[in-house]
Amino acid sequence: DTEVTQTPKHLVMGMTNKKSLKCEQHMGHRAMYWYKQKAKKPPELMFVYSYEKLSINESVPSRFSPECPNSSLLNLHLHALQPEDSALYLCASSQSGGPYEQYFGPGTRLTVT
Amino acid sequence: KNQVEQSPQSLIILEGKNCTLQCNYTVSPFSNLRWYKQDTGRGPVSLTIMTFSENTKSNGRYTATLDADTKQSSLHITASQLSDSASYICVVSAQVGAAGNKLTFGGGTRVLVKP
């Protein structure tokens, strides 16, 4: 199974809402990633988790809060977002400790109203 | 600063024709170079991955080349099909200790195949 799943596929939320994005993989990967992608732009790295510990935070605003409850799951908690946060949020996973292949999920299309 | 530049930004080709996409990079320390295909609104899907010592790698009708000396790569699509319409992203990987690898993405080339 080389699949990374993400839920929901689409999410519309107001600026005062609290929501969460979920990502799951069952490939035994110990590195998991969150990316943000605006239209016609390449993905931008937000967070990297390695062995369930946050190892990279690319100066992401605190209204985005990642969580890795176990080796298969990665969450992104959203609170008080701005309309400019509307984007495709991609999750990826890879083996850890080297330049291994990253497998991407299909993404969650987020719209902030 | 690590950078990946792709050209052209977009191109239109007729079904059945071939095309070549270019990628230049300045990433250090270099680990590998990947080409991804991304359909609109979907996650990227890996086509090829090449390490420093590999010059060429094929995946069906997709053939990637790598010149590590000049820091250039190309992706050749043979006998294009309508389903090849997508963005093609060149991604260069640098290892970041035990944390895994950090990817630098190119801006992508948007390919449109017309019948």
Image (cartoon, coloured by chain):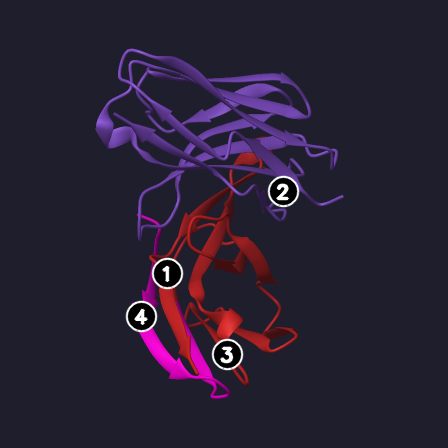
Chain colours: A purple, B red
Tags 4 and 1 on a common chain: yes
Q: Is mark 1 on a helix, strand or loop?
A: loop
Q: Nearer the viewer, mark 2 or mark 3?
A: 3
Amino acid on which the number 4 mark rests in the picture:
Ser
Residue A28: percent from left, percent from top: 74, 33
Q: Name the residue under label 3.
A: B76
Q: Distance between the residues labelled 4 and 2?
A: 32 Å
SS class of the residue under badge 2? loop
Tell me the subunit letter for badge 4: B
Out of A61 and B80, give the one closest to the viewer: B80
Nearest-to-viewer mark from 4 and 1? 4
Which numbered marker is on residue A98?
2
| Residue at the (53%, 78%) spot, across then down | B81
Residues in magenta, as a range: B1-23
Foreground mark, 1 or 2, reads: 1
Q: Which residue is drawn at 73% across and 33% down?
A: A26
Q: Which of marks 1 and 3 is nearer the N terminus?
A: 3
Tell me the residue at 32%/31% (across/down).
A111
Who comes first in sequence, dot 3 or dot 4? 4
Specify the label residue B10 is tagged with. Answer: 4
Q: Is residue B20 magenta?
A: yes
In the picture shown, does residue B109 fall above or below A18? below
Output the chain of dot 1. Answer: B
Residue where numbered disc 1 is placed = B108
State the residue in front, B18 or B64: B18
Pick the quarter of the image with the C terminus of chain A: top left
Q: Label 2: how many residues lie within 10 Å, few (<14), some (14-19) or many (20+)? A: some
**CB contact under 8 Å: marks 2 and 3:** no
